[in-house]
Image (cartoon, rainbow, N blue to C red):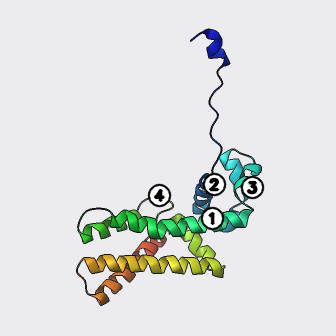
């Protein structure tokens, strides 16, 4: 390649942010603070873009928050369920894998800092509380099926599933203090 060709090459531009990028950045911010602290200008600054980029993907802050809730709902229900159900191993190994996800240091995992922010937000917002309740019920049902597959009776599987959920949520609260 000639010197002239090298000089005229521009560095590759970074691809524009996608809706998913904004949602992931919002989740990171919510894992660090409360929902009131999530501001579009702060989020744009963190991502190194203008607020105009935000409005390309969202109607406003509330639209972003709804997208964040929907992302969490999908991750905590169908995506986790698929991840665990599609893995090999005994039912007890799948249960252990599910618990290991919950005690991971990642902020967005079940019971992680992001979920704690959502649970706090749910105390003040009935719509969020409904979504959290829906997700909790789906997660408890899935855990109950895993414990049932592991050989427990229906009643014991339900008890273990409820204890499982209490552990996942309570474990983070205990570690945070």
Q: Is mark 1 on a helix, strand or loop?
A: helix
Q: Badge 4 is on which residue?
A: 106
Question: Residue shown at 56%/12% (left/top)?
Answer: 1
User: Badge 4: few (under 14), some or many (20 or more) residues near its Cα, within 10 Å?
Assistant: some
Question: Residue shown at 41%/60% (left/top)?
Answer: 104
Q: Is mark 3 on a helix, strand or loop?
A: helix
Res. 28 visible in picture: yes
What numbered label is drawn on residue 67?
1
Q: Which of marks 4 and 1 is nearer the N terminus?
A: 1
Q: For the residues marked 1 and 2, what is the alpha-carbon distance in whole angstroms?
A: 9 Å
Q: Which of marks 2 and 4 is nearer the N terminus?
A: 2
Q: Do the residues labelled 3 and 4 touch (CB within 8 Å)?
A: no
Q: Do the residues labelled 2 and 4 touch (CB within 8 Å)?
A: no
User: Badge 3: few (under 14), some or many (20 or more) residues near its Cα, within 10 Å?
Assistant: few
Q: Are marks 2 and 3 in contact (CB under 8 Å)?
A: no
Q: Which of marks 2 and 3 is nearer the N terminus?
A: 2
What numbered label is drawn on residue 55?
3
Res. 34 visible in picture: no
Q: What element carries label 4?
A: loop
What numbered label is drawn on residue 19?
2
Q: For the residues marked 4 and 1, what is the alpha-carbon distance in whole angstroms?
A: 20 Å
User: Badge 2: few (under 14), some or many (20 or more) residues near its Cα, within 10 Å?
Assistant: some
Pinpoint residue 26: horizontal percent, then vertical percent.
Answer: 63, 58
């Amino acid at each position: 390649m000639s010197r002239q060709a090298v000089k005229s090459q521009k560095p590759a531009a970074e691809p524009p942010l996608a809706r998913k990028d904004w949602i992931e950045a919002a989740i990171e911010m919510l894992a660090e603070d409360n929902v009131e602290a999530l501001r579009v200008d702060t989020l744009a600054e963190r991502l190194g873009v203008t607020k105009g980029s935000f409005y390309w993907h969202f109607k406003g802050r509330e639209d972003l928050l709804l997208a964040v809730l929907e992302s969490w709902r999908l991750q905590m229900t169908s995506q986790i369920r698929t991840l665990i159900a599609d893995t090999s191993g005994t039912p007890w190994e799948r249960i252990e894998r599910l618990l290991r996800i919950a005690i991971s240091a990642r902020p967005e995992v079940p019971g992680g800092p992001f979920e704690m922010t959502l649970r706090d937000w749910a105390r003040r917002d009935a719509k969020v509380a409904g979504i959290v309740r829906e997700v909790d019920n789906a997660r408890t049902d899935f855990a109950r099926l895993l414990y049932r597959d592991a050989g427990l009776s229906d009643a014991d599987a339900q008890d273990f599933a409820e204890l499982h959920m209490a552990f996942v949520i309570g474990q983070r609260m205990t570690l945070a203090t």
